Amino acid sequence: MALLSHLFLGLPFRWLWSTAVSVLNLENRSLWYTSTMTKLLQEAIDKVSTLPEATQQSIAEDLIAHVASVEHLRAELQKGINSLDRGEGEELDIEQVIRTARAAYDRN
């Protein structure tokens, strides 16, 4: 995040948003921003654009990080789906999964 704050210092929110779209390779979905953005997201961006630049930068950094996290999760899920499609999955012992999860929880 520190690197992002240095890179985006003094830049307006809309530029940051378009940069996030570009960095996350969303421009290939050409109509994504203009036609499929929810009204709530558009309202949020409009409200953020009225805030001081430092606040806009902070919100933009958080949004970029969140979108990157979601994209990473989707990629990892797709790897798992592809693995299952190739027949590489194996049956789980659900009782063992529960015991392992409980043991990990108890340690914390």
Image (cartoon, helix red, strand yellow):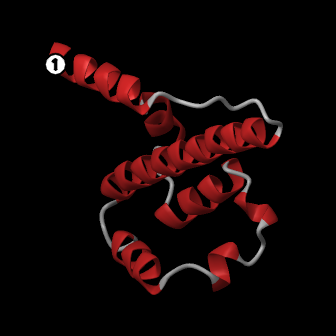
Task: Specify few, some or many for label 1: CA neighbours under 10 Å numbering under 14, 14-19, or 20 or more.
Answer: few
Residue 84 in view (yes/no) = yes
Q: Is residue 80 above or below residue 26?
A: above
Q: Is residue 93 above or below residue 45?
A: above
**Quarter of the picture holding the N terminus:** top left
Please state which of residues 64 and 97 is positioned toward the viewer in this rendering. Answer: 97
Q: Is residue 26 above or below residue 68?
A: below
Horizontally, is 74 left or right of 51 in the view? right
> How many numbered marks are there?
1
**Quarter of the picture holding the C terminus:** top left
Residue, disc 1: 106
Question: Where is residue 14 shown, x and y percent of the image?
Answer: 53, 67
Give me the residue at 54% from left, 38% from top.
Answer: 7
Please state which of residues 82 and 86 is positioned toward the viewer in this rendering. Answer: 86
Give me the residue at 42% from left, 29% from top.
Answer: 2
Give me the residue at 39% from left, 27% from top.
Answer: 97
Horizontally, is 94 left or right of 8 in the view? left
Give me the residue at 24% from left, 24% from top.
Answer: 102
| Residue found at the very far top of the displayed protein | 107
Horizontally, is 46 left or right of 3 in the view? left
Label 1: state its secondary structure.
Answer: helix
Residue 8 in view (yes/no) = no
Classify residue 37 by image quadrant.
bottom right
Question: Where is residue 18 shown, x and y percent of the image?
Answer: 63, 62
Please state which of residues 100 and 55 is positioned toward the viewer in this rendering. Answer: 100
Question: Where is residue 23 shown, x and y percent of the image?
Answer: 68, 48
- Amino acid type of the residue that numbered disc 1 sits on in the rendered structure: Asp
Question: Where is residue 75 shown, x and y percent of the image?
Answer: 67, 42
